[in-house]
Amino acid sequence: MKVYELAAGGDGLDRLRRADRPMPVPGRGQALIRVRAASLNFRDLAVVQGVYPGPPATGNLIPLSDGAGEVVAVGDGVTRVQPGDRVAATFFQTWADGPPPPGCVALGAAPADGVLAEHVVLHEDGLVHIPQEFSFEEAAALPCAAVTAWNALMAAGKPVRPGASVLVLGTGGVSIFALQFARAAGARVFATSSSDEKLARAQRLGASGLINYRTTPDWEQEVLRLTGGRGVDAVVEVGGAGTLAKSFQAVGFGGKVALIGVLAGRSGDTSPHPLMFKAASLHGIFVGNRRMFEDMLQAMTVNAIRPVVDKVFGFDDAADAYRHLMAGRHFGKVVITL
Ligand SMILES: NC(=O)c1ccc[n+]([C@@H]2O[C@H](COP(=O)([O-])OP(=O)(O)OC[C@H]3O[C@@H](n4cnc5c(N)ncnc54)[C@H](OP(=O)(O)O)[C@@H]3O)[C@@H](O)[C@H]2O)c1
């Protein structure tokens, strides 16, 4: 079967190459999936560049965590899925509910192969059924970015409620899902972007406070101005060390900052004291579990929310999909079909 692998040595996109592997066979409790689509996350750029935290790859690795397809065979003892089912993989294969179990690994980074392959074998517990109305491309957009956004808004700390205000940073995968979920929950959404054109697209999705963080580098002051000095109830913090101090300013009394990303840098000192004075909280987010994924799918179905897929690339053009994400030209998700 056709796969892509990241060669064990070297760094960057030169490591990404086509390969053939034997068809995998599902063992007890496992399902064989014909992958139909896979999506990229910012994380996948870190993996290909060899800067993703975790153990170094000891051999060639199939990249990408997020995929969707159909079950074609199952091993002994499988009860959750059957051949013909349309499914998506969970980011953490063994994290079904509650806290993550010991040894829980994520797909698409050492030591676990990912989904950029015609077929994959996954444990039945690491699969969710996808809504009938979703294409495989849409479903493949969900496992990492959407579950992270859902966790940040609905599972970590106080869930976002009608009338709340939510700030999303940039217009990448996590942030656009967060925009959609916050609007469905009845919240007012503030969005930042480096691009006025992308802000116009965010407005069409329901964002009402639009701030270009290039032309308005003090965007946290603008958030305060737009909220009459109150600040927002939730910040979807995908910037990390480079934006955290501003997010602490932008969050309001009793609000929460969901710490997710590293887009604006990985190191730096940020005093947490602003949180103390306004009884605000900081929540670390690490994607989420299968329960969150399934809750999120219910909410997406009821609210008719469809993933925003920026561009779909063919399997032969997988490297171009990586380049598109690296260039930051996307709005929402970048997908590869198989
Ligand atoms: N902790 C977790 O569980 C978890 C899960 C998923 C993702 N993440 C992290 O969350 C971040 C976003 O991931 P993603 O996959 O959604 O990324 P993505 O789709 O690649 O989004 C990148 C976008 O973020 C915006 N951006 C870049 N630098 C920025 C900055 N300094 N300030 C504000 N916005 C900035 C840009 O939007 P504009 O073009 O609009 O400016 C850019 O297009 C990454 O750091 C990723 O590692 C963490």
Image (cartoon, helix red, strand yellow):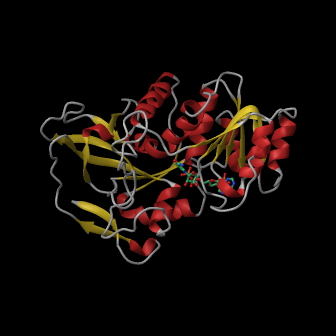
Picture coordinates of residue 197, whole percent (x, y): 71, 49
Q: Residue at x 87, y 35 (%)?
A: 229
Above or below residue 301? Residue 335 is below
Would residue 184 be found to the left or right of residue 38 on screen?
Answer: right
Between 222 and 313, the one lying in front of the other is 222
Q: Residue at x 37, y 40 (%)?
A: 95
Q: Residue at x 38, y 30 (%)?
A: 131
Above or below residue 50? Residue 221 is above
Count up the numbered dots.
0
Above or below residue 19? Residue 156 is above
Between 215 and 200, the one lying in front of the other is 215
> Which quadrant would the N terminus be assigned to in this image?
bottom left
Q: Residue furthest bottom?
A: 10
Would residue 232 be found to the left or right of residue 299 on screen?
Answer: right
Between 234 and 35, the one lying in front of the other is 234
Picture coordinates of residue 248, whole percent (x, y): 75, 45
Quadrant hosting residue 298: top left
Would residue 166 be found to the left or right of residue 296 on screen?
Answer: right
Would residue 224 be found to the left or right of residue 56 on screen?
Answer: right
Between 25 and 251, the one lying in front of the other is 251
Picture coordinates of residue 73, whole percent (x, y): 16, 41
Picture coordinates of residue 84, whole percent (x, y): 22, 35
Quadrant hosting residue 3: bottom left
Q: Residue furthest left?
A: 76
